[in-house]
Amino acid sequence: MLKTKTKKNFSHRKSESGKGSRESRLESKEIPKNLFKAAGRLKELKRSGWVKKLGMIDSESVADHSFRTSLLAAYFSLLENLDSAKATRMSLIHDLAESEIGDLMPEEKISEEEHRRLEDQVSRQIFGTLPKRPKKVFLEDWSELLLRKTKESKLVWQLDKLEMGMTMKDYMSKGGNKKKLLRFDPSENLSRKLKIFLSEYESDLKTREIQH
């Protein structure tokens, strides 16, 4: 695993007068800075369980987790004839509030109810700064995700657990402490179909190890 991070500074050229695109004509209040700043912070925020319980230096970030969860959501929602766009959006935003409140482990939370209240508050503040159309869609997605009643929302929360299990298997295949890593095994909370998927994923990792 990599043990160093490289930071790059990016500069942006201002549009020349008279050549402004639709984007350059946007008023400051219309630019969704809060949304994308939050997403950027997730790239730097490590998943705390791997760091605090396993002492990992190069653990995945919350953004890493959200990316693969979103890809899983796009894939499985298509297989199950669900609203794939909605499921993918839900996955992309499901941990967005952690950009402000951090990635807390269960024992670090005041209570699950209070944690969800804080997540809801932060997420609504972020989405509340968006232009009318994306604001409406993201707020609807977020509310649906919290209620956990639709097939898409239930799938996303299952895939949130599945992705953690896949990362656990990834770390095992790289020589991680199996006994400690098994504390993150989500199998008991997965549907039968996703348990099989996780098992097959592990088998594929082992096959690759043998081949190399």
Image: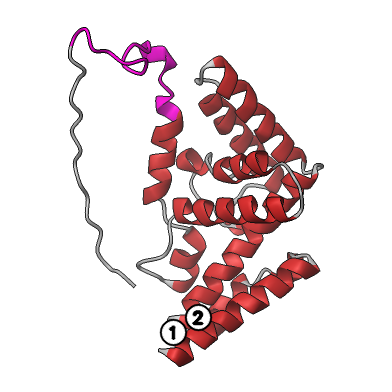
Element at badge 1?
Answer: loop
Label annotation for residue 24: none
Q: Where is residue 78 in the image (x, y as percent from the top left)?
A: 69, 51
211 up-or-down from 134: above or below:
below
Residue hosting label 1? 175
Q: Position of residue 11 (x, y in %)?
A: 18, 33
Q: Residue at x 19, y 41 (%)?
A: 9
Q: Is residue 172 left or right of residue 94?
A: left
Residue 46 lies in magenta, yes or no?
no
64 up-or-down from 20: above or below:
below
Q: Residue at x 67, y 34 (%)?
A: 141
Q: Is residue 131 left or right of residue 79?
A: left
Residue 32 lies in magenta, yes or no?
yes
Residue hosting label 2? 172
Task: Tell me which corner region of the image, top left, top right, bottom left or bottom right, holds residue 115.
Answer: top right
189 up-or-down from 36: above or below:
below
Q: Is residue 34 left or right of residue 182?
A: left
Q: Which amino acid does label 1 sit on?
A: Gly
In the rendered image, the residue lying farthest to the bottom is 210
Q: Which residue is drawn at 53% across and 39% down?
A: 97
Q: Where is residue 182 in the image (x, y as percent from the top left)?
A: 60, 78
13 up-or-down from 146: above or below:
above
Q: Quadrant where the N terminus lies? A: bottom left
The total number of labels drawn is: 2
Magenta range is 17-34
Element at badge 2?
Answer: helix
Q: Residue at x 56, y 81 (%)?
A: 204
Marks 2/1 in contact by CB < 8 Å: the verdict is: yes
Label 2 to label 1: alpha-carbon separation: 5 Å
For label 1, count other residues whose C-alpha is less than 10 Å away and answer few (under 14), some (14-19) or many (20+). few
